[in-house]
Amino acid sequence: MAEVDVLVVGAGPVGLTAACELRRRGVRCRVVDRLSAPQSFAKAVGVQPRTLEIWDRMGVAREALAAAAPLRGQLIYVNGTEQARIELSLPPDVPYRFAALPQYATERILAELLARWGSHVERGTELVSFEQDADEVRVCLALPSGAQEWVSAGFLLGCDGAHSAVRKGLGLRFEGGSFPEEYMLGDVEVDWELPPGYAVRAMHQSDGRTDDLLVCIPLPGRNRYRMSMLVPPELSLSPQPGGDEVAHGLESGPTPGLPHIQAVLDRLAPQPTQASALRWSSVFRISHRLVDRYGEGRVFVAGDAAHIHPPTGAQGMNTGIQDAYNLAWKVALAVRSTASAGLLSSYGAERRPVGEEVVQRTVRHAGGGVQADPDDPSTVIRREAQLLVGYRGSPIVGPDGPPRQGPAAGDRAPDCDGLRHDLTTFPFRLFDLLRGQEHTLLLYADDEAQLAPYDEVVASARRAAQGQLGVWLIAAWRLGTDGLPLPVVRDSLDTFRRNYGARGGEGFLIRPDGYLGLRDAPVSGPRLAEHLALTFGG
């Protein structure tokens, strides 16, 4: 028997997300990181609405909201003239908005959650090598003392960044290229009078080509921004690394000072301004790469270990968090030996297409910005918010069926408000009912005749899910449900019916990661059982 169920390598936002979700499900988990202490850098800053939905389910949305600042939009300037103002507005069915939160705060919040589950990060501990067979992964770790430790783990998750030792040890191809430009980052305050909460993208263009660039992302605090800009010659780290070495992320060497940042502001800032309070700075490079597969056997990669790309649109950390969220519940079922034979392979089948799309899109946006996207603005905003990420066609998702209103199998399950319980005087959101660790079956009824088969349907589904299934009946406002042995909420504002395109007698099976696994009308116990067999072993 393995000494630990899962070993997570890397304690950034991705590794911490995976570890928290595993521990929430009772999985024995160790988390190691080669750094002796967390970094105090505001590297990844943008937090997408979909990530806040995930944190809601994990139980840390309150902490994130307390520490974050609103990200309201983007101001775009070319040669000193405002060209566009993008408003990051979303429809009311989306419960969270765009936020700015320094990566060090994200890591602190997730590490504190991990501690509440009784685990901590083992710092200064580095993966040296590993080997696996059908039953376990044997991992060699270098400890802070200089000694080595061999660990037997059921699964190994590589969340160890662009230079991932797990990816290299697994022999995954990491194909792509790098951008020739070098950039510098700085966390500073300015005294301009631009509207708060708006990112700034200021460019100098000549003959239609951008030859100078300033990007400012607001941070919590008054007029505080994480700024990125082209590197001046005296800070250049050229030439680029050769061979298979990945040129991506913060670099060692000379660091920018306030005069370097002020020089760029003097050239490109929309208003005359003075930079101050430099908290940290660095030079960095950008590559775009994607692994050929997301895992093999009992070893998987997530986040920057699997995909790297330009930071346009704040897609990197958020995509990695979704990787970890998708993977953790599946690994937890495998640890408990309740997973189907194909469940773990669905991780790569679902997440690699997402990584590929994000890499391609951010490369396109790197030159012209998000505003260059040809789609209509509402679609662009929802895509940037990662609300359009979906898994239609996944091997563990039900068939699409005939065209219908509302989400299809594989789509994100949207929220809705106005749900009422007979024992409360306040309304619920649907997301309030989906915070468990298991699948959730939502049964919709608008006529009493539809209630008769529900007992048999629920019993069949619970057997197929080996008891790991929550059930709620969502009833039309005036429907009588007295004596029904199911928990009931009423669709008092008709929002569930409208947001889901629900029909009386229909069932919606929501996965633990908040995606719709199956919608079935009229709901059938045998069809639910057949679908759940794609996830749960016999």
Image (cartoon, rainbow, N blue to C red):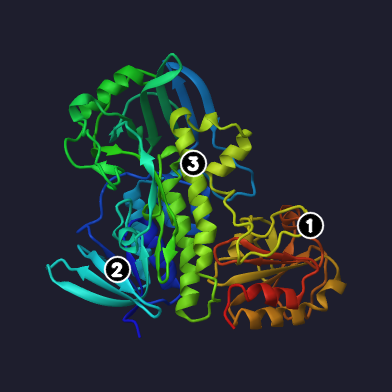
List the single residue furthest toward the left. 146
CA gap, disc 3 and disc 1: 31 Å
Kind of residue indicated by mark 1: Pro
Q: CA distance from mark 1 to mark 2?
A: 48 Å
Q: Which mark is residue 402?
A: 1
Assign the C terminus to one quadrant of the image: bottom right
Q: Earlier in the sequence, mark 2 or mark 3?
A: 2
Residue that numbered label 3 is attached to: 360
| Mark-to-mark CA distance, 2 and 3 | 36 Å
Give the quadrant of residue 258.
top left
Residue type, numbered disc 3? Gln
Circle count: 3
Residue 140's place in the image compared with 384, above or below, is below
* Closer to the camera in the image, 356 or 113: 356
Sequence-earlier tag: 1 or 2: 2
130 displayed left or right of 421? left
Residue occupying image coordinates x 82% and y 68%? 479
- Residue matched to label 2: 120
Residue 114 position by quadrant: bottom left
Q: Is residue 263 above or below residue 218?
A: above
Instruction: Assess disc 1: are there few (<14), some (14-19) or many (≥20) residues with their C-alpha within 10 Å of its C-alpha.
Output: few
Provide the secondary structure element on which disc 2 rests.
Answer: loop
- The answer to whether residue 65 of the structure is visible from this angle is no
**Residue 31: quarter of image:** bottom left
